[in-house]
Image (cartoon, rainbow, N blue to C red):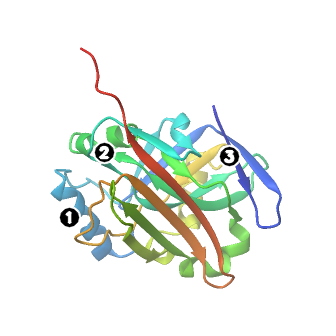
Amino acid sequence: MTALSFELPDGSHRTVEVKRLLNAGYAGRSQEDVAAHVAELAELGVPAPSTVPALYPVAPYLGQQTTTVPAQHARTSGEAEWALVVDATGDLLLTAACDHTDRALEAHGVAWSKNAGPDVLADRAWRLADVADRLDTLTLRAWVTPAGGTEELLQDGTAGELLPPQYWADVLRERGELQPGTVLISGTIPMREGVDQFAAHWRVELADPATGNTIGLAYDVVPLPEPIG
C-alpha cells in the first residue's frame, strides 16, 4: 500500500496507508458547470456519462506525493481538485490534489483513463473541521507550463463550485468506506478556453482567503522512452 504523510498547520503530521482511492466525476454543484465539463471532454472524444455525479474506483497505489509523472504520450493532463483523506486516526483531512489522466484512453473509458495516471496529492493538509465553516470560499487554481514556455492560469474557481466534502463523506459512509485509508478526489472545475492543458508542468493550489494559508503541489510530466517491440 502507498503511505502518505501530511503536515498540518500546527506542525504535526498525519499518516495514511491508502486502501481505497476514489475519483469523483462531473461533481459540480452547477449543472451549467457540469455541462461545460462534459463539453470539454466531448472535444477529446469522451462520451457523456450515464449519471452524475460519477464515482470511479482507482488502484490505491496511484495516490502519490510526487514531483514527477511519467507519461506514455503527449495527450495526458491533470485537473485541479481537492482531496478528502481519512487518516490513520479516522480524522478527515482536506488537501490539494491533481488527477493526472490519460486523455487518449479516456475516449474508450473514463474509469480506464483514471487508472492510467496518478492522483498527485500535496504534502500539507487541513483538518476538515477547521475549515468547515468557510469551505465554499476556498479557492482552487491550476497553472500549466508548456515545454520551454511560460506558466499560464488554466483553472480558477472555488470549492463552492463542487459538491462539498460532507456530501462525499455521507456517500462513503453509506458505502461502508469512510474508514482510515480512504482517499476521495473531488472532481474538477472548468478549464479556461485557449490554454493548452497538455503541458510539461502542472501546479495546483488550494487556498484559504480568510487566513492566507495555502496548500500546493507541483510536478513535471516526463515522457517515457520509446518502447522496443
Mark 2: secondary structure: helix
Count of numbered tags: 3
- Amino acid type indicated by mark 2: Val
In the displayed orientation, state which residue is furthest to the bottom.
Answer: 210
- State which quarter of the image contains the C terminus: top left
Q: In this view, does 165 lie to the left or right of 31?
A: right
Q: Is residue 229 visible?
A: yes
Which image quadrant for residue 150? bottom left
Q: Is residue 27 visible?
A: no
Q: Name the residue under label 2.
A: 110
**Can you give x and y, in whole percent of width and height, for residue 226 in the image?**
28, 26
Q: Residues within 10 Å of mark 3 (few under 14, many from 20)?
A: some
User: How far apart in space, not on screen, are marks 2 and 1 (Cα)?
Assistant: 14 Å
> Residue at point 20% right, 50% down?
46
Task: Classify 24 as above or below 167.
Answer: above
Which image quadrant for residue 95? bottom right
Q: Residues within 10 Å of mark 1 (few under 14, many from 20)?
A: some
> Residue at point 37% right, 51% down?
200
In the displayed orientation, state which residue is furthest to the front.
Answer: 148
> Residue at point 45% right, 49% down?
220
**Can you give x and y, in whole percent of width and height, for residue 9 in the image?**
77, 67
- Amino acid type indicated by mark 1: Ala
Mark 3: secondary structure: loop
Considering only order in the chain, which callout, 3 or 1, is on the residue closer to the N terminus?
Answer: 1
Residue 39, which numbered label? 1
Residue 179, which numbered label? 3
Is 80 in front, or is 224?
A: 224
Are the residues at dot 1 and dot 3 in contact (C-beta closer than 8 Å)?
no
